[in-house]
Amino acid sequence: MEFYISCFCEMLDIPVRAVNIPRQFILAFFRPGYSAENLKDPQELIEFFIDPTTGQVFTHHDVESYFRRIAMDPLPSCFAPRKNKEVIQTLLIEFGKCFANDKDRSKQQELNDLSKSLE
């Protein structure tokens, strides 16, 4: 679902992209006219953040609080727009975690292999 939201926004020329916030899948609404190339400090170009599963909107202050809570520094790379291929790889790995028991371990391995094949 998250990937579809990102793709639909891209097709409609809405500047919403997935960003690499640690342990979260979050979308960022970039200021109109941003360019994904040569972003020195992408955080400055983000208006707000969106949780794609609930639709909840987060401010910069909310995200800064999250980084403090997990005891990490918010690096510029955390706010850079992710490529669609990276998003698909992440979603395949996360989906594979649903098959953690011994009976379904082969399904998890197949999803991990599929993710690696996209590299």
Image (tube, grey):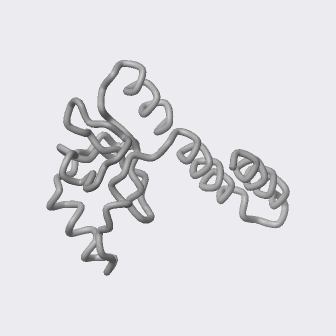
Q: Is residue 68 above or below residue 63?
A: below
Left or right of 59: which side holds 85? Answer: right
Q: Nearer the viewer, residue 100 or 60?
A: 60
Q: Is residue 73 above or below residue 48?
A: below
Q: Is residue 51 above or below residue 7?
A: below
Q: Quadrant of residue 15?
A: top left
Q: What is the number of callouts on the image? A: 0
Which residue sits at x=41%, y=58%?
24
Q: Nearer the viewer, residue 43 or 112?
A: 43
Residue farthest toward the bottom in the current orientation of the protein: 71
Which residue sits at x=42%, y=31%?
5
Which residue sits at x=45%, y=46%?
82
Q: Nearer the viewer, residue 100 or 32?
A: 32
Q: Is residue 65 above or below residue 116?
A: below
Residue farthest toward the front in the current orientation of the protein: 38
Residue 95 in percent (x, y) is at: 63, 51
Left or right of 107: which side holds 12? Answer: left
Residue 17 in percent (x, y) is at: 37, 39
Residue 30 in percent (x, y) is at: 25, 39
Q: Quadrant of residue 13?
A: top left
Residue 113 in percent (x, y) is at: 78, 53
Which residue sits at x=72%, y=64%?
100
